[in-house]
Image (tube, rainbow, N blue to C red):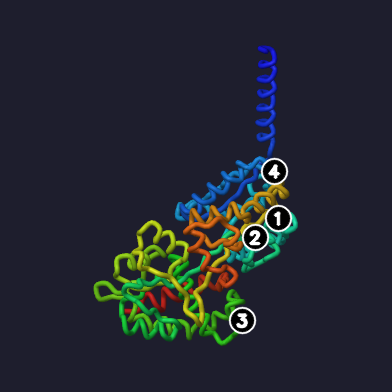
Amino acid sequence: MKKALLLVLAIVTVLSVCTTVFADDLPTIKFWTTGSQNVQDVFTEVVNAYNAKEDRTANVELMMILSGTGDTNVRSRYIAAYKAGNTSDFDIIAENGADYLIYFQEAEQEGIADAENLFIDLDFDKMPNFANVKMVPCVYPEKFVPYRGTTVVFDYDSAKVPEPPQTWDELVEWMKANPGKFVYNSPSTGGAGKSFVTAAIYRLIDDPDAFKNAGDPKYQDMYDAGFEWLEMIHPYIYSSGGHVQYAVKNQGALDLLAQGEAWMCPAWADGTLSALENKTLPETVKMYQLSDLSLTGSDVDMGICSTSQHIDEAYDFMNFVVSPEAQQIFVEVMKAVPVIDAGLLEPSPSVEAVSKLNPADFNIVSTGANETVINDRWAEDIETLD
């Protein structure tokens, strides 16, 4: 009996060693992304969940660069690695969809002749879960997979605004009737203000394709009407000390809403939901879109770097990221809008909240290099107004 027990223990020990060796023998793929702490928090959970899967084909290492750390951004690092022929440091990169345009533009500026090959063209058959993805990337859909959606909405305090304006014209009338109660952050400091300014400008361009082709340089000569509109509403924006004050960063506008200083502002949907859950916004705050033109949203995507030596393994991880299991994590941890039908997720208060936002309906706009033009002109023409 003792010998039999020792034999069993020996077998178990061997199996344990074999399992460990097998796990250690899996290749490690490096997954790069950037953003705020909530992005790091959610991807830490997603990566841990993947690395706990027995049938995974790789171990994933999260390479996170937090926004505002002053460190070199992911884009510059990858372009430098690509130019140097470094094939060991980059496997997958996750970015806002529109930012990938800047990758290709910067690579061309660096003299990289094949800049369009920074990311591979994907074989979607290697990601069975992609069949459930409802969102389409705003650029290069053959190269990128959306993993979460987000959009800017109008937040308002329903205790003070029982009947919010429903159209852009009604919004102007509401501002005039409630001077100082609307605020938005300067577009260079956060995406919510940028979305509001972009929508305000492009809706007044006489071209039905303006939003679809927003990055075309030709539109720079068509911005006057939009900036005149922004100048027109300037006197009705939140003021302090007798002077109009534009919020700094997305959070700055939410803070004014929470304090009751402002009654309405553009804000990210996920940021609003998180603030409501954390009770940093009063429960009377609600969010919605204007009926004649919604504010712009964003797809946040993943792409496989052409420098990767583990492309099949990268597919396996990306397939997991768009699975119901991983999408549930994005919803629960950061209130992201899932890229698959919310009905595929386990019911929860967070799922119920985001299910009202359909990523297929998002007004996704990529202004590319025009963004800098808009920001600079806004700072010169609007921010300096008395």
Identify which amino acid the numbered label 1 is placed on: Met
Q: Which residue is mark 1?
A: 127
From the viewer's side, name the closer residue of 93 and 307. 93
Identify which amino acid the numbered label 3 is placed on: Asp
From the viewer's side, name the closer residue of 249 and 51. 51
Q: Residue furthest left?
A: 241
State which quarter of the image contains the N terminus: top right
Q: Which residue is mark 3?
A: 209
Alpha carbons under labels 3 and 2: distance apart: 24 Å
Q: Which residue is mark 2?
A: 145
Identify which amino acid the numbered label 4 is placed on: Thr
- Could you tell which of marks 3 and 4 lies nearer the N-terminus? 4
When the figure is inspected, residue 310 is found, relative to residue 177, above or below; the finding is above
Alpha carbons under labels 1 and 3: distance apart: 32 Å
> Residue at 70% across / 17% down in the picture?
7
**Residue 22's x, y, as percent?**
69, 33
Compared across the picture, whether 233 is left or right of 206 comes to left
Q: Pointers 3 and 2 in contact (CB under 8 A)?
A: no
